[in-house]
Amino acid sequence: METFANARELSKRAAFEGDYVLGHSQREIRRLTIQGTLLRPITERLMRQVNIGPGMRVLDLGCGAGDVSMLAAELVGPTGSVVGIDRSAAVLDVASQRARLAGLKQIRFEQAAVQNYSSDESFDVVIGRYILHHQSDPVDFLRSAARLVRPGGGIAFHEIRVVQTADSLPYVPLWQLAGNLIETACRSGLPHYDVSNRLIECFFEAGLPQPHLFCETLIGGGIDSPLYAWMAESLRSFLPQLAKIGFALGEPGVLEAFEDNLRAAVVEARSQIVAPAQVCCWTRM
Ligand SMILES: C[S@@+](CC[C@H](N)C(=O)[O-])C[C@H]1O[C@@H](n2cnc3c(N)ncnc32)[C@H](O)[C@@H]1O
């Protein structure tokens, strides 16, 4: 039986940390912002459950283009503060520019790996979205994150469940195919693609209190659904990983019409489509 500890050991050896599977191209940054808009209500629910509110000090782990940091900044208001950290300098430039345009002066971005990050003051809440599955050792990552939380403060994660969750009724083969390809890319390219289903185990191994959990699923259909763009851009971002395992779809341009093709197929079938489930957890220290 595959145990979490075994999987953790294997991926540590593979040293995935220096090999972030999605990269930070302009197109990937665009995908992150489309994704950020879709996920915002779910992340906001998590932030409210962990009690992020005015005046608080929040740390966003692996902030990417800054969507989670900006949402936290709105909740803490001008009297609070948010620090967003990410290993990638390129993505932090985008995040800083977006925060500036939004007039959110209470955010600061810093380039750092979570495992090496230290701060003079601890945080009321430490949060991360779509970050645990990228870690070669999520338990060690959780311990590093927990060290940054003040006693009584909160720690929260929003992750994605990629295994067999894309669905459609009536059945739309193209939607299912996209879901299956993304699942394959995640299984082969992410060190812990299944961590969203192992959060209790992970928190236990890190010596943290058992997390509260909830799960939400994005569903849609019809001409205007943003799910087509999300699926098409996600598939595009995973093309290099699919090529790595020997499934080359050709030049990136091959997906130019994919979003429109998905929309047309779903609309024609009058299908109700289901996107991968969103799993959130939080606890207090
Ligand atoms: C999938 S993106 C998610 C970005 C953002 N949290 C969001 O939801 O829009 C993951 C980000 O985490 C960063 N990252 C991954 N592991 C990290 C680590 N150990 N320390 C700092 N940043 C990390 C990557 O560079 C990437 O920008």
Image (cartoon, rainbow, N blue to C red):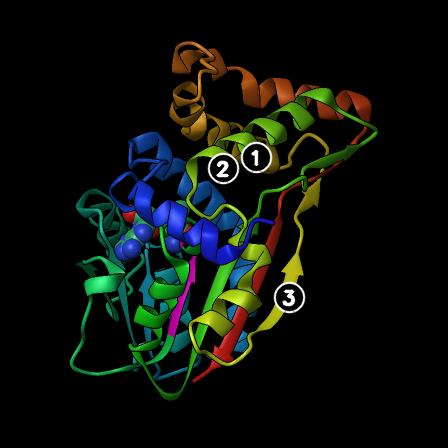
* Residue 213 rendering spot, x and y as whole percentages: 61, 69
What residue do we see at 32% from left, 41% from top?
14
**Residue tagged by mark 2?**
186
Farthest-out residue, front: 1
Q: Nearer the viewer, mark 3 or mark 1?
A: 1
Is residue 32 in view from this perspective?
yes
Asked if the stretch drawn in magenta spans residue 130, the answer is yes
Which amino acid is tagged 3? Answer: Phe
Q: Residue at x 54, y 66 (%)?
A: 201
Which residue does the numbered mark 3 point to in the structure image? Answer: 214
Between 82 and 148, the one lying in front of the other is 148
Q: Residue flagged by tag 2: what amino acid is it?
A: Cys
Of residues 56 and 143, the one nearer the viewer is 143
Q: In this view, does 239 lie to the left or right of 170?
A: left
The quarter holding residue 170 reads top right
Give x and y (percent) for residue 79.
Answer: 30, 82
Q: Which amino acid, mark 1?
A: Glu
Vertical side of 189 occupied by 103: above or below? below
Residue located beneath label 1 in the image: 183
Sort mark 2 into few (<14), some (14-19) or many (20+) by Cα contacts within 10 Å.
many
Q: Which quadrant holds residue 67?
A: bottom left
Number of other residues with Cα within 10 Å of mark 3, as a class: few under 14, some 14 to 19, many 20 or more: some
Residue at 36% from the left image edge and 52% from the top image edge: 135
Which comes before the other along the chain, label 2 or label 3? 2
Instruction: Please provide the residue range marked out in magenta.
Output: 126-131
In space, the residues marked 2 and 3 are separated at their CA atoms by 22 Å
